[in-house]
Amino acid sequence: MPTALVTGVTGQDGSYLAEFLLQQGYKVIGMVRRTSTINFERLKHIQRQIEIVQGDLLDQMSLIGILQDHRPQEVYNLAAQSFVPTSFSQPVLTGEFTALGVTRMLEAIRFVDPQIRFYQASSSEMFGKVMEVPQRETTPLYPRSPYGVAKVYGHWITINYRESYNLFGCSGILFNHESPRRGLEFVTHKITDAAARIKLGLAHELHLGNLEARRDWGYAGDYVRAMWLMLQQDAPDDYVVATGETHSVQEFVEEAFSYLDLDWKQYVVQDPKYYRPAEVDLLVGDPAKAGAKLGWEPTVNFRQLVRLMVDADLQTLQNNEK
Ligand code: NAP
Ligand code: F7E
C-alpha cells in the first residue's frame, strides 16, 4: 500500500484529494497545524480512515519528523494562506507559509528521502496581469498580489530543486476550482450561499466587489485527480489545469440567482470594501498539455458547477432550519 502525505488536508482540496487517494488504495497521512480545535468539518466522513499528524509549514523540524516517521512515497503540498485579500493585509505571513513553506518541505524531502515524489499547488494567480490569452505552461508570470508573488516563488523553487537535485517535483498550475466545500469568503461560495439564503428568506442582499473580473472556474473534485496523475508519470513536469472557459463574476451571479428564479439586480450591492489594491482581470487556461500527457479533462461545466453549489447550500440551510 503506497503512503501519501497531504499538507492542507483540512482545506477544500485536501479533503477531496484524501478521499481520492483512499479510493486508489493509499495510506493517507494528513498534516494539520496545531490549533485549540482542529477543523475536521470537511474530513468528518473519512476522519477514521486517514492518519492525522501535527506539523506546520513554518516549522522545519516538524516536516522532517513527519517524513522520517511515516516514509511517504508521495507528498502533496496543498497547505497555504490561500485567500488573496488576506495576502494584502498579512503579506509577511503569506510569504512565510505560501512561499518559504515550500522550500522547507523540499529541504525535508532532500534530507529524508530524495526519491519522494512532490506535488506543489501552484496557481493561475501567478499569471496575474496576463501576458497571453489563454494562459499555458510557458506564459510569462506577472503576479498581482502578495499571494501570487508567493506562489511564483513556490513554483520556481520546485523547478529549481528538480533541476538542481533531480527531485521528482511537479508544479500544478491550477485555475480556480470550487465546490460546496469551498471557503465561504471566496466569491463563488459567497454567491451561492447568499442566493440560497435569499431564496429561503434568511437574507436580503449580497455585497460584492468587482463584478467584471473573469475566471476559469472548474470543479475541485476533478482537479485533485490531475494532481495525482502528475505524480504517476515517468518524469516530473508542470501542467496547467483548467476548463478553457472564462466567465465574469456577474455571470456567476446571474446563473446562481436565475436558477432559483431570483432577479439578482434586486439583491446585489456593489461594495468598494471588496475591491483589491490590484486586480486580476481575466484568467482562462489552456489545459491541452494536461489533456495530451495526463489524459485529464474536466467532467463538470460552469452551469453544472453553479447549480451543484446552489443545491448543496439550499440543502445545508434547510437541514439547519430543521
Ligand atoms: P484552503 O481551503 O484555504 O486550505 C488551505 C489549507 O492549508 C488548510 O488545510 C490550512 O489549514 C492549511 N494551512 C495553512 N497554513 C498552514 C501552515 N502554516 N501549516 C500547515 N497547514 C497550513 O485552500 P484550497 O482551496 O484547498 O487550496 C489548496 C492549495 O491549492 C493551496 O495551496 C492554494 O493556494 C492552492 N490553489 C487553490 C486553488 C483553488 O482555486 N482552490 C487554485 C490554485 C491553487 P487550517 O485548516 O488549519 O487553516
Ligand atoms: O475572487 C472578485 C475578486 O476570492 C475571484 C484562490 O483559491 O483562486 C482563488 O483566488 C474574483 C476576484 O478567488 C468579491 O475581486 C468580487 O477577481 O473567489 P476569489 P481568487 O482571488 O481568484 C486562485 C486560483 C487561487 O490560487 C487562490 O488561492 O472575484 N470578487 N466580489 C470577489 N471576491 C471575493 N472573495 N469576495 C467578493 O465579495
Image (tube, rainbow, N blue to C red):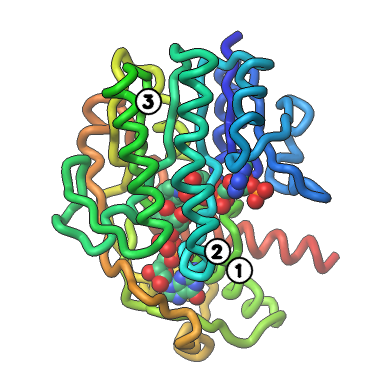
Asked if disc 2 and disc 1 are in contact, CB closer than 8 Å, the reply is yes
Pointer 3 residue: 169
Closer-to-camera residue (38/150)? 150
- Location of residue 203 in the rendering, given as x and y in whole percent from the top left corner: 67, 82
Label 1's element?
helix
Crowding at dot 3, Cα within 10 Å, few <14 / some 14-19 / many 20+, comes out as many
Viewer-side residue, 221 vs 3: 3
Q: Which numbered disc, 3 or 2, marks the residue that appears first in the sequence?
A: 3
Q: Which residue is mark 1?
A: 193
3D distance between C-alphas at marks 2 and 1: 6 Å
Amino acid type at image mark 2: His
Residue drawn at x 44%, y 46% is 99
Rendered location of residue 200, percent (x, y):
69, 76
Q: Amino acid at mark 1?
A: Asp
Mark 3 vs mark 2, foreground winner is 3
Q: How many marks?
A: 3
